[in-house]
Image: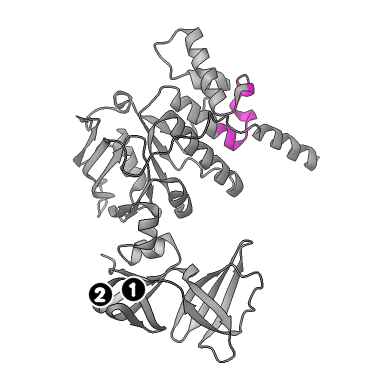
Amino acid sequence: MADGTARREKALDDPPPRLLGPPPLLPRGAGRTLLAVEGLTRRFPGAGLSAVNGVSLSLREGELLALVGPSGCGKTTTLRMIGGFEPPDSGRVVFDGRDVTADPPERRGFGFVFQDYALFPHLSVLDNVRFGLRGLSRAAGRARAAEMLALVGLSDHGKRMPHALSGGQQQRVALARTLATEPRLVLLDEPFSNLDAARRVETRQEVRSLLRQAGSAAILVTHDQEEALALADRVAVMEAGRLAQIGAPDTVYRNPCDCFVASFLSRATILPGEARGRVVETPIGALALAQPAFGPIRVAIRPEQIALALDGHGSGRILAREYRGHDQFYQVRLRDRTVGVISAEPEPLPVGVRVSIAVRGAVSRVADDR
């Protein structure tokens, strides 16, 4: 019975979306500004602090921006204010040169994909996609809905009801319904959180390709750092209602602005040090600096920068090990601190052994948290 169920679920997950050639690649920086968010602030009644405090950002045509941060940081509230579902206490939203701050959601012309997909259980897949196509005849609406189902690889599922689909397929139906109206901007609120780990990776790449093909700009809210770094053209990291840092994924990861961003995007080790130009003296030795500095500073070391070697006289001792298939994460006690290390070496090092460490590449200076 279990094998039969697994085969049925696999059949439901096929086929993948029909991609109409490779998605167009948008050079970073291409496209004019489509959305400008200026100083958005929102404080809920009875709350001591603002849920969102002075957030400003912009979005170019065809760009995907990820809003990422821990639970309660204000990313969903920011998205809801952009979409018109939550009124800001101050600030404004400008779309395509027009101030839409006071406009309700239906007048903004944005597409929305929510965490729960919001499919109508009593309507077929085809009718779910056709639902938002007001102003078209029944025949034209069905033709457009069929076209969008073909785009997401669900041409043969139009007569099914939503409950007969897998989570990944329901996500693709929700996206097809959104893209059917040809929005220039799509807002996605934790759209992959209901999927298992393997399906998340596959579905998010499908969604990325579909947005590229449609030419829609998008803002994705997620708490998953890996998801944000993998999908977005730019990443905006939020903390306690403020925008901590925004930039290209590799820039934000390699050059975090402060200790919070460094630690949130990875299990970074933060060390104090005394900088002398391109070198910084730290409790674990002299390290190369990515940018010259002088005097007391803090630096962030990414766990993949640290190499371990068995050494009976080494200054470190392995406290714990997490086996993760493609690599292993070690916690290493080094004098008066614990550092995190990611190693892709095939042979694991036992817990308790002594090791020496070496830091590869330059480390980044980070500011103290504000």
Identify which residue, 26 or 96, lies in the foreground: 26
- Give the residue number, with chain letter if any, for mark 1: 289
| Callout 2 crowding tier (Cα within 10 Å): few <14, some 14–19, many ≥20 | some
Residue 368 lies in magenta, yes or no?
Answer: no
Identify which residue, 219 or 326, lies in the foreground: 326
**Marks 2 and 1 in Cβ contact (< 8 Å):** yes
In the image, 94: left or right of 116?
left
Is residue 54 shown above or below 278? above
Residue sitting at 47 percent across and 49 percent down?
230
In the image, 324: left or right of 105?
right
Please indicate, yes or no, whether residue 122 appears anywhere in the rendered image: no
Residue extending farthest to the right is 1
Image quarter (top left, top right, bottom left or bottom right) of the C terminus: bottom left
Q: Amino acid at mark 1?
A: Leu
| Callout 1 crowding tier (Cα within 10 Å): few <14, some 14–19, many ≥20 | some
Please indicate, yes or no, whether residue 215 appears anywhere in the rendered image: yes
- Give the residue number, with chain letter if any, for mark 2: 293
Chain part drawn in magenta:
156-170
Is residue 147 shown above or below 43? above
Q: Position of residue 146 (x, y in %)?
A: 55, 18
